[in-house]
Amino acid sequence: MSGTIGRQSASYRQGLVLGLTMAEIMLLLVFSLLIAVGVSLTSERVKRDELMQRLRSAEAAEAANSAMVDAIRRNPRISEFLDRTAAGAASADAVDEYWRTLVESNEIVEAMERHGVSRKALKEGKEDFARMQQLRNKGLDPDEAARGAALAAAIDGVLPDDAVAKRTPEQIAALIVEGIAATQSHDEGGPKEGHQWPPIINLSEAGGYFFATRSAELSPDFEIKLRTAVVDRLLDIAASFHVDVIEVIGHTDERPVSGGGLSNLDHELASVMSGANGVGLLQPADNAGLGLARALAVVNVLSTDLRLRNFQILPLSAAQLIGTDGRLTRWDEHGDVRERRRIEIRMRSSM
């Protein structure tokens, strides 16, 4: 009996072990299957990502090619040449010559850029040449047209703002003839009648040259023009008339300076002139002081330009005493007269 029970116990244990072994094998198979599925999914994902990357690259290349085609089509010469090449009308030598010319042209442009000439400047130069060719086709001399434009600009720069409007065309023509005759006489070493004065530079509020109200502080735009166009004009005048003194004269209208305070110019002019303090520190109590303070503001800007380092630059005030016609005022313009609120710059020789 005991032997029978022992055999049954052994059989039960064998069956239990066999059952556990089969379950473990099934779990192992399921785990292996899951690993295989995961590897397959990962491989598929990688292939999908590679395919998407290729599609994006192809789209980018297509867009770039389309942009290049559009750019070529916008250039009639290149478009026409490519059409001729596709139709077989262009020989191999012509194709080689055309592309060699393009490469050389690009090298020339890059060399110009390395020397400081921008593509924009080159393009504008080409447009200027085209305009000159149009003038020639109309029977006009581009050099004469340029001289005429320069002469008109010179008249606007030399005469006061309202002087041109007050003169007839015949009077302006007479002034031009006199100026040309005087210049030719000077160049030829011939006799000169009277004095050959340099032109006066007129910077009025009416012309866009502003100070702060009742102040000597320059507007930013005024200061920029002083450092650029005005300095260039001074150098041109100096080269033509051999002058070395720049007189900056502040003019005002006849409106009294409001505020009623005391002037501090006697105490602060030296510090502002030396650059230790800004011109905003000055507090003029009358038009004479306001004109001087504004002239000093302009002098301080011009004195910082190294191109004018060999010039004497002097601030002066004419207050409300001199009108735009160069004559003493008639004391009958008491209102807001922008033309009279101005800076005049005169040049002369120190000899």
Image (spheres, rainbow, N blue to C red):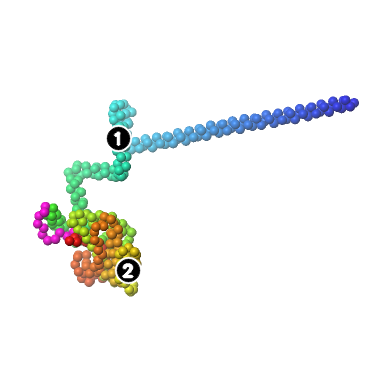
Rounded to the nearest angstrom, the CA distance separating label 1 from label 2 is: 64 Å
- Which residue is identified by label 1? 104
Q: Nearer the viewer, mark 1 or mark 2?
A: 2
Q: Callout 2, which amino acid?
A: Glu
Q: Is residue 150 visible?
A: yes
Q: How many marks?
A: 2
Query: Of helix, strand and loop, which mostly describes the magenta segment?
Result: loop
- Which residue is identified by label 2? 268
Q: Residue at x 18, y 45 (%)?
A: 141
| Towards the viewer: 13 or 275 | 275
Horizontal and vertical percent for residue 328? 20, 69
Q: Earlier in the sequence, mark 1 or mark 2?
A: 1
Horizontal and vertical percent for residue 128? 25, 44
Label 1: how many residues lie within 10 Å, few (<14), some (14-19) or many (20+)?
Answer: few
Q: Residue at x 24, y 61 (%)?
A: 312
| Residue 68 forms part of the magenta stretch | no
